[in-house]
Amino acid sequence: MSERHPHQHGAHPHPHPHGSSPGPRRRLAHMLSPHSHDTADKVDPALESSARGMRALWVSLAVLGATALAQAGVVAVSGSVALLGDTVHNAADALTAVPLGIAFVLGRRAANRRFTYGYGRAEDLAGLVVVLVIAASAVFAGWAAVGRLLDPRPVTHLPVVAVAALVGFAGNEWVARYRIRVGREIGSAALVADGLHARTDGFTSLAVLLGAAGSALGWRAADPLVGLAITAAIALVLRDAAREVFRRVLDAVDPALVDRAERAVREVPGVREVGELRLRWIGHRLRAELAVVVDGEATVRQAHAIAVATEHALLHAVPRLTAALVHADPAPAPGETDPHLALAHHLPA
């Protein structure tokens, strides 16, 4: 059985220039930056991915925060309920960076005797918070739109409302592309869900243009009706985001990943069969647990070497896999009793 520390490929050791004496700034940066004097001690990709996630969150928070503030000023002077719903949704989307940021920070903490798998699950809990925020913004947007339908009011400063809608679309689409790309690259379902949330915000911003056009033609109901359409769009993205996040919470993985892992293990010299193989996400990192069948006459050292080779093959074959627990079972001999028989009464029926 083999359990090893997270494995890294492609990282570069901390550089040490030769032939020149480093200045005070370089020496200070050297002391404050994570580095290693051992060429085998590389930067942890899991920490790199958390840093990328944090960067994506704070950049998008700044962009969406500025967008929401600009729109809020227009709402105050125009009274557009459609733009109000869009503004609230943009503000909520910006604020979801807070729980996700906390989750990424917690995910960097080392495992301990209470949290033996580390704190990566905090990211899944943050995904649930994102889903709740999306739901709350949908309820608020719907409530404001229904209230305006029951009590119609004119919308003023329509050209400014139209410009604010375009600003909202541009800001949200940029943030959506950025979050979704980084989320998929680091394997963060919560960050992808947040990116989908931003993309829907962008299209709802365009819908505000329709409300402004209707109001310009004298149709007072146009603005609150667009507000209701925005509510429906938020509900659709809520469904998609909730499905992705709840799948992650329930340890769902793409079956293609399992197939890929099995193919890699079967190619390892010494592996006769692949037994039960399990993959699970812990935040945006994968762990594997599996059993392999080896020659029953193999020594403990030989079986361990096969287990290590199996883990190594998995780390190369499965993206974002950081650790694997490999159990080596001996191939049964004729007439031999199943060595796992003593465990049978502990297993569920």
Image: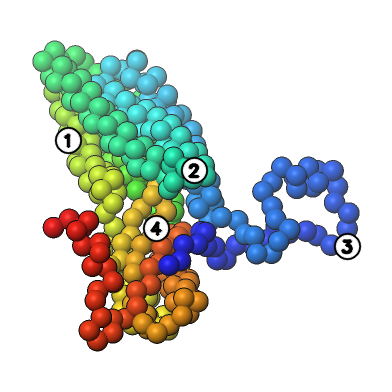
Residue 19 circle label: 3
Who's the residue at 41% across and 80% down the image?
268
Q: Are marks 3 and 1 in contact (CB under 8 Å)?
A: no
Does residue 59 show up?
no
The quadrant the C terminus occupies is: bottom left
User: Mark 3 or mark 1: which comes first in sequence?
Assistant: 3
Task: Tell me where residue 7 appears, x and y as whole percent.
Answer: 52, 62
**Looking at the picture, which amino acid does disc 3 mark?**
Gly
Residue contact between numbered discs 1 and 4, judged by CB atoms under 8 Å: no
Residue under label 1: 232
Is residue 152 placed above or below 243 in the rendered structure? above
Which mark, residue 287?
4
**Three-letter amino acid code of the residue under disc 4:** Arg
**Residue for point 39% across, 57% down:** 286
Height in image: 180 above or below 99? below
Give the class, few, some or many, for how many residues have Cα within 10 Å of label 4's Cα (few <14, many ≥20). some
Which of the pair 154/118 is nearer the observer? 118
Instruction: Give the vertical position of 323 relative to 151 (above or below).
Output: below
Q: CA distance from mark 2 to mark 4?
A: 17 Å
- For discs 3 and 1, the disc positioned in front in the rendered view: 3
Residue that mark 2 sits on:
112
Q: Nearer the viewer, mark 2 or mark 4?
A: 2
Q: Amino acid at mark 1?
A: Ala
Q: CA distance from mark 2 to mark 3?
A: 43 Å
Classify residue 212 by image quadrant. top left
Give x and y (percent) for residue 289. 36, 62
Q: Nearer the viewer, residue 262 or 343?
A: 343
Lower sequence index among marks 1 and 4: 1
Which of these two is toward me, 255 or 24?
A: 255
Q: Helix or strand or loop: what does disc 4 sit on? A: strand
Tell me the distance, in whole angstroms, between the alpha carbons under discs 4 and 3. 43 Å
Q: Amino acid at mark 2?
A: Asn
